[in-house]
Image: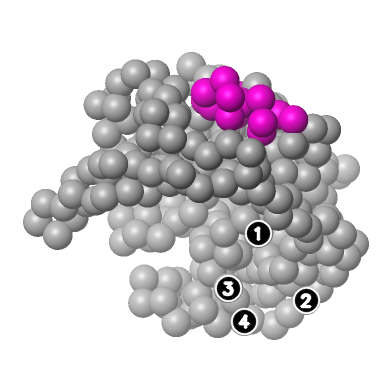
Amino acid sequence: MKEILRIFPPDLKSWVALRVGNRWDKLEEIRCRINQPIELIFEDEVEWITEVLPSQNDGMFLLNQLSEYSLYRLENELREGYITIEGGHRVGIAGRVNTMDGSVKTIQNISYFNIRVARQKIGVAEPFIPFIYEDNYVNTLVIGPPQSGKTTLIRDIVRIISSGWKDKFARKVAVIDERSEIGASILGVPQHDLGLRTDLMDGCPKAEGMMMMIRSMSPEVLVADEIGGEKDIHALWEAIHSGVTIICSIHGQALDDIKRRPLLENMVKAGVFKRFIVLGKRTSTYHQVQVFDSNGKRIQHYGDRWK
């Protein structure tokens, strides 16, 4: 996890490395707050580093490392409240917000950092392939709250579809990776295994990226993570009308939650999504996952068998 450790100043880096030890595979978040103990969030427990408190200078060091000493270069990311670093790890930030015309212009006096650890889990999507394939892959929406494993699942679905699985032929997959979390690309090259027939648009807004990929890369399956805005939904309609299968994820607690959202209501009523995969409670030994059809009927439920 050198990509994560490199952003910390030497003293903090030493303590984080010492306390995490050989448990990087269980670490989910590192929360660093100025003048407060560092919080380590593992799959089933929380620990605190109280021996050293991050200072304002430490916070500036973190920002400089994240931005490579050019905050202007990350202006858009700062407005969104997160920065994605090498390896696909996302660093959430918070502080004083400056607004213009009711919209966030920038975040200043950044004093809160949340490093969310990204990792690839090969094979995690295999139990779901039979449910999202009916002579062809079907439009699928993955639903779940933050840290429920949406991106991990989407990433492995991409790998399987574009490489082929059992008797299912490999398909051309286009991924719009706006936050650089699916592929964790460096200079445009994914660091995660996304399969043999995947083309990826990195750092591009989803709506624009979907249209660009349809025009230029003739995908059979289009994948996007964390849709939500009106432009995203419009682009999904355009993709469907183009005959492309869509697989995407969205923040939510349950299928009923999604049905009540005005932007998605028409899509759900029209039966656009043939499958809904709803991710729920997750620990190191248990992950509640449900699969629904287009009518909202549950067709599969997983408990501790899916990890």
* SS of the residue under disc 4: loop
Of the two numbered discs 4 and 3 on the same chain, state the one appearing first in sequence: 3
According to the picture, the residue beneath numbered tag 2 turns out to be 299
Q: Residue at x 43, y 35 (%)?
A: 55
Q: Residues within 10 Å of mark 3 (few under 14, many from 20)?
A: some
Residue 155 horizontal/vertical position (percent): 65, 42
Q: Which label lies toward us, 2 or 3?
A: 3
Q: Which residue is mark 1?
A: 148
Q: Are marks 4 and 2 in contact (CB under 8 Å)?
A: no
Q: Quadrant of the N terminus?
A: top right
Quarter of the image for residue 13 reads top right
Query: How would you rate the neighbour count of disc 1 (Cα within 10 Å): few for under 14, some for 14-19, many for 20 or more?
Result: many
In depth, the one of 182 and 244 nearer the eye is: 182
Rendered position, 277 above or below 176: below
| Label placed on residue 295 | 4
Q: Which residue is mark 3?
A: 253
Residue 207 circle label: none
Q: Quadrant of the C terminus?
A: bottom right
Residue 51 position, x and y percent, is 64, 39
**As shown in the figure, which amino acid type bears the numbered disc 2?**
Ile
Which kind of residue does numbered mark 3 sit on? Gln
Q: Mark 2 and 1 residues: CB-CB less than 8 Å, in contact?
A: no
The CA distance from mark 3 to mark 1 is 10 Å
Is residue 223 shown above or below 285? above
| Residue 41 % position (x, y) | 67, 51
Q: Earlier in the sequence, mark 2 or mark 1?
A: 1
Residue at 50% over, 75% down: 258
Amino acid of disc 4: Asn
